[in-house]
């Protein structure tokens, strides 16, 4: 059995195709994240609504798409909807006839189902007293949500959102099954051409590792920016007062120590 050896010549040869696949992966991820941010807020508000007309459909949406495997969801959107004759003849076929659009739809539905719980948990973590105080001051509920609840929820949910973004990025590896040329598809093509499984797969793994860690670094910077005021306040609280010479000389404990030393010196002198 051959040892695990990386063929760097093959890596260099397939690098342009890998970069094109990386661009496709990043483009799909960015589009899904933007759509997720657009639709997750109204869907979360519907999920948290006391009106069952809004809450029940939102709860069913979350339950269904969280439980549906992503691979099955992509097959259903791309291959399943293509079997519907009315859809093929309708005005929406330009969307469902595109593998790229179907990948975005499937990933967005899966991403939204998880994002609703992330946003809901972040909003519920905001103290209820803030909303009550803003209502007592006559602030409109819409302004309370926009300027008080939502910024605090962003601060509370940044770590959970980071994990979801990382999972989404790694989940894009399955879109190659619906004929999209992403990183995984390029690696499979190189493997089928050279019968070398280690070089392309480890190269793709390295690309994903770098991409995910760059994202984590960006979220760490964003978290520090959102919590900058709290960090400064904690630093002031933990700051120890600097003892100056004057404070040491005129502190009552210094007088007592000096007086005690004088009494001891007098007793020793008397002896």
Image: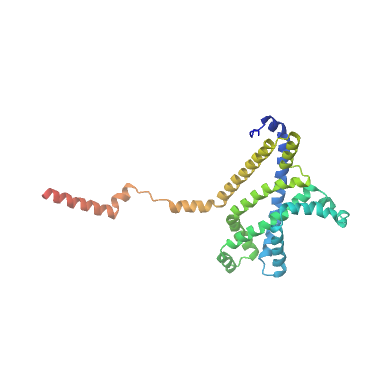
Residue 100 at x, y = what percent? Answer: 78, 47
Asked where in the image residue 37 lies, by quadrant, the reply is: bottom right
Q: Which of 185 and 24 is in front in this view?
A: 185
Look at 65% across and 42% down and name the residue there: 208
Q: Which of 140 and 26 is in front in this view?
A: 26
Residue 20 at x, y = what percent? Answer: 73, 38
Asked where in the image residue 23 lies, by quadrant, the reply is: top right
Q: Nearer the viewer, residue 220 or 184?
A: 184
Look at 72% across and 65% down and name the residue there: 57
Residue 145 vertical placement versus 242 (above, below): below
Asked where in the image residue 256 lies, by quadrant, the reply is: bottom left
Q: Which residue lies furthest to the left in this view?
A: 271
Residue 251 at x, y = what percent? Answer: 30, 53
Q: Residue furthest top?
A: 9
Numbered-mark total: 0
Give the quarter of the figure containing the N terminus: top right
Look at 60% across and 54% down and name the residue there: 160
Q: What colour scheme governs how the chains and residues are painted in the rendered image of this protein? A: rainbow
Judged left or right of residue 98, residue 210 is left
Look at 62% across and 63% down and name the residue there: 144
Q: Nearer the viewer, residue 207 or 184?
A: 184
Judged left or right of residue 20, residue 89 is right
């Amino acid at each position: 059995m051959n040892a695990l050896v990386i063929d760097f010549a093959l890596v260099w040869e397939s690098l342009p195709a890998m970069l094109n696949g990386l661009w496709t992966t990043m483009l799909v991820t960015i589009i899904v994240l933007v759509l997720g941010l657009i639709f997750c807020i109204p869907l979360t508000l519907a999920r948290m609504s006391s009106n069952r007309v809004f809450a029940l459909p939102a709860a069913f949406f979350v339950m269904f798409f969280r439980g549906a495997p992503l691979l099955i969801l992509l097959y259903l959107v791309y291959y399943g909807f293509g079997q519907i004759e009315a859809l093929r003849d309708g005005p929406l076929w330009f969307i469902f006839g595109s593998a790229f659009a179907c990948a975005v739809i499937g990933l967005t539905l899966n991403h939204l189902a998880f994002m609703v719980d992330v946003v809901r948990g972040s909003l519920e973590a905001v103290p209820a007293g803030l909303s009550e105080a803003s209502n007592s001051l006559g602030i409109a509920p819409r302004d309370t949500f926009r300027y008080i609840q939502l910024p605090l929820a962003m601060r509370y949910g940044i770590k959970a959102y980071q994990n979801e973004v990382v999972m989404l990025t790694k989940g894009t590896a399955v879109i190659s099954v619906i004929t999209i040329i992403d990183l995984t598809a390029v690696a499979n093509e190189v493997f089928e051409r050279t019968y070398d499984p280690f070089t392309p797969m480890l190269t793709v793994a390295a690309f994903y590792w770098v991409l995910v860690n760059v994202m984590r670094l960006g979220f760490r910077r964003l978290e520090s920016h959102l919590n900058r005021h709290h960090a400064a306040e904690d630093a002031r609280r933990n700051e120890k007062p600097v003892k100056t010479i004057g404070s040491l000389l005129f502190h009552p404990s210094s007088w007592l120590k000096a007086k005690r030393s004088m009494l001891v010196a007098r007793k020793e002198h008397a002896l």
